[in-house]
Image (cartoon, grey):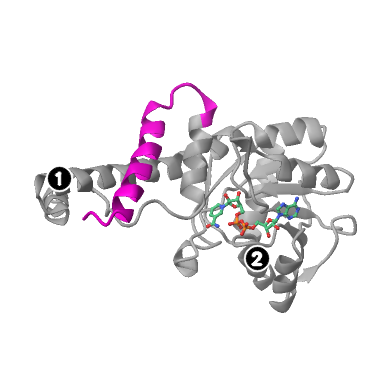
Amino acid sequence: MSKDLQKVCVIGLGEVGLPTALYIKEKGLEVCGFDISSRATERARAMGIDTVSLDDADADVYVICVSTGFRDSAPDMSPIIDVCRKIAEKNADLVAIESTVIPGTCRKVYNEVFRGKIPVVHVPHRYWAGDPVNHGVKQLRVIGAVNEESLELGVDFYGRKLEIPLHKVSSVEVAEMSKIAENAYRYVQIAFAEELRMICSRLGLDFNEVRGACNTKWNIEILEARDGIKGHCLPKDIRYLASLTEFNNLLKCAISTDQIYQEWIKRGEK
Ligand SMILES: NC(=O)c1ccc[n+]([C@@H]2O[C@H](COP(=O)([O-])OP(=O)(O)OC[C@H]3O[C@@H](n4cnc5c(N)ncnc54)[C@H](O)[C@@H]3O)[C@@H](O)[C@H]2O)c1
């Protein structure tokens, strides 16, 4: 396995893709980017990232940071599949999927789109725009791959070239699952705090005082309850997890608890 992995194309130049491209450039690699949105492309160019059409892109590594969402309330992985169909026509050495996906997506890309010819790793993002220095591109990341060769290339690229600390897992499916599970876990924790706050209010108790008292116990950490669970990642990822099997009772309750809480906040109850 001795591949150069010097030329990188970042696909999807949004909230995580643009800082990713900038970080890779800062590390001395040759970077270009592609996005279907002219706004995203212009913003990237203004920040020093060359942009290309996907047809013209010629890179060793393709880093995929496109948006993922829902179609008819089912997880929609089509933006990933669409860009991978284009990459399949090229001589890529490695494809790194950083977007959040449901388990099975990366292997489907490897088997059905790349026909086993292009190595694939999944390195889900944990980006938090609120603190990009500590929780940005270069934070501890999980890496999983479709096979040993892909994992070696991924570790060489992310670990050695980009100096990103990595937690290796035994399969790409574990990496995919870890991302949606960590966000769903946080969602459930917040929903618990929200419900407790409503219970305390109904009983005339100070939620923050109750929370502070509970949190003096060594294994308890009740979170704050603020304005409801906002942003797109946590609400999307818990729904991805809930969509996978019939074992989703707690997940569905957490989603409806947050809806009830947001209504409660809107009514001005405290
Ligand atoms: N924003 C975060 O904090 C965060 C954190 C962790 C994971 N993620 C995940 O990373 C992925 C990207 O999130 P984001 O916040 O950067 O989204 P975003 O909406 O800010 O950016 C996504 C970009 O992808 C582009 N795009 C969509 N389809 C495309 C296609 N077919 N070809 C080229 N470009 C395409 C869009 O035009 C957009 O500019 C999502 O899967 C998200 O769940 C985001």
Quadrant of the image where one finds ligand 1: bottom right
Please tell me which residue lies in front, 239 or 119: 239
Residue assigned mark 2: 18
Find residue 231 and report its horizontal and vertical position in percent: 48, 55
**Residue at the extreme front:** 267
Three-letter amino acid code at disc 2? Leu
Find residue 131 and report its horizontal and vertical position in percent: 45, 67
Answer whether residue 146 is visible to the viewer in this image. no
Answer whether residue 216 is visible to the viewer in this image. yes
Q: CA distance from mark 1 to mark 2?
A: 46 Å
* Label pair 1/2, CB-CB below 8 angstroms: no
Using residue 156 as the reference point, say whether residue 42 is left or right of it: right
The residue at label 2 has a CB less than 8 Å from ligand 1: yes
Q: Residue at x 43, y 27 (%)?
A: 248
Using residue 172 as the reference point, say whether residue 35 is left or right of it: right
Q: Which mark sits nearer the N-terminus, 1 or 2?
A: 2
Dot label at residue 269: none
Three-letter amino acid code at disc 1? Arg
Q: Taken as a whole, is the magenta stretch helix, strand or loop?
A: helix
The residue at label 1 has a CB less than 8 Å from ligand 1: no
Dot label at residue 202: 1
- Secondary element type, mark 2: helix
**Span shown in magenta:** 243-270
